[in-house]
Amino acid sequence: MKIEKIHTLGELKKAGYKSQKIKDELRNNLREKIKSGIPTFEGVHGFENTVIPELERAILSRHNINLLGLRGQAKTRLARKMIELLDEYIPFVSGSEINDDPLNPISRYAKDLIAIKGDDTPISWLHRSERFFEKLATPDVTVADLIGDVDPIKAANLKLSYADDRVIHFGMIPRANRSIFVINELPDLQARIQVALFNILQEGDIQIRGFKLRMPLDMQFVFTANPEDYTNRGSIVTPLKDRIESQILTHYPKTIEISRKITFQESKLTPEQKLIEADGLVKDLIEQIAFEARKSEFIDQKSGVSARLTISAYENLISNAERRMLINHEKTTFVRLADLSGIIPAVTGKIELVYEGELEGPAKVAQQFAAICANRCAGEKRQ
């Protein structure tokens, strides 16, 4: 179907277009990828036999999903990769605030327009990159932000009574109709705001300032949460948790090889920095720092040690070698053991210390990790 030739509802019908719910869309496209042997979440390493199969099962079951894991475990990355399972383009009623399906409109605007223009109703096309919405759950988020509110300016401009539902200004969730909507750090969302999500998840109803609108929103919800948040900053209220059908646990890389692959994929090096040579053993020892930290008695293991630690540490390691090269007016260089001292700032900002660790101080704890790795590197080179 050539979308450049379809501009009206009548042309859409003639083309034989059949609309489908977003969860069916994700399910059908996932089925095709699995049958074709195409990787579904390419670029996410270490989850091939654990998290990804569970995520695929949740999508096949058409579930809303909660990704539960410590910081730096690729939860948001997984949610964003789901965009690749959407159709490239979908049609919507031109001018609709909530991306109304031309064949199944739900807003008053779209219904009225179709009633007036019929098959001449103008159609626009929405690319899958525009069908992903993300909101960080912060304490200042309101029901009006997520669901909507009455807009007095709209009422005044249109000369409408507050009893008319056309005065409603839709929030982020209705505007994300037919899209993937991600709420990060869900426990940080106030309990009363979580309650506002109940009907949207289950029945599709939204209530705005006394207006009870039957709007069966077509959404794929993905939530992310850190287990530590359940006790430190908030919790997911039980009825909401009950409405999220699949909860999937994420984890850190289980081997040095996987961790190293993630680091090299995510590290942002300039073309000049990519010319600096780094011994394979040194690269492994950068990853070993995170593994040592994840079992250290000085580190708060409930908070976790993010994969971003090794990414930042590797970038600092290369930059330290680059700085030395520039000072000595050298054209090329390679990473030396002494360059490991440059990774300390990348470590201190990414670890949460327990009481014993605070007594030692973050810089000293980071230096201990670097020293352990340097000594191990020197020992293995002697062997």
Image (cartoon, grey):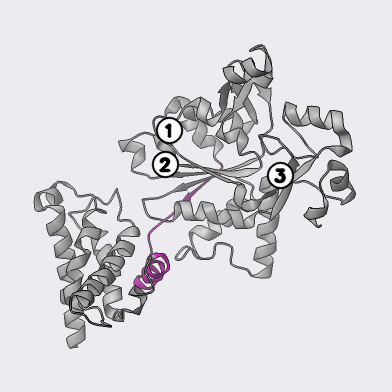
The answer to whether residue 381 is left or right of residue 188 is: left
The one nearer the camera, 101 or 351, is 101
Q: Secondary structure at mark 1?
A: loop
The one nearer the camera, 345 or 53, is 345
| Residue at the spot of label 2 | 185
Residue 318, position as x, y percentages in the image? 28, 72
Identify the residue shown where x is 22% and y is 75%.
Answer: 326
User: Is the residue marked by circle 2 packed among few (<14), some (14-19), or many (20+) residues within 10 Å?
Assistant: many
| Residue at the spot of label 1 | 189
Residue 295: tell me if it is visible.
Answer: no
Q: In the displayed structure, would residue 278 be above or below residue 343?
A: below
Dividing the picture into quadrants, the one containing residue 191 is top left
Identify the residue shown where x is 29% and y is 48%.
Answer: 302
Report if the CB atoms under discs 2 and 1 are less than 8 Å apart: yes
Is 256 part of what is drawn in magenta?
yes
The answer to whether residue 99 is left or right of residue 326 is: right
Q: Secondary structure at mark 2?
A: loop
| Residue at the spot of label 3 | 21
Residue 190: tell me if it is visible.
Answer: yes
Q: Amino acid at mark 3?
A: Lys
User: Is the residue marked by circle 3 packed among few (<14), some (14-19), or many (20+) residues within 10 Å?
Assistant: some
Total numbered badges shown on the rendered structure: 3
Q: Which residues are magenta?
A: 245-266
Q: What is the CA distance from the residue labelled 2 to the residue labelled 3? A: 26 Å
Q: Secondary structure at mark 3?
A: loop
Q: Amino acid at mark 1?
A: Leu
Identify the residue shown where x is 53% and y is 53%.
Answer: 80
Residue 242, position as x, y percentages in the image? 53, 35
Is 28 part of what is drawn in magenta?
no
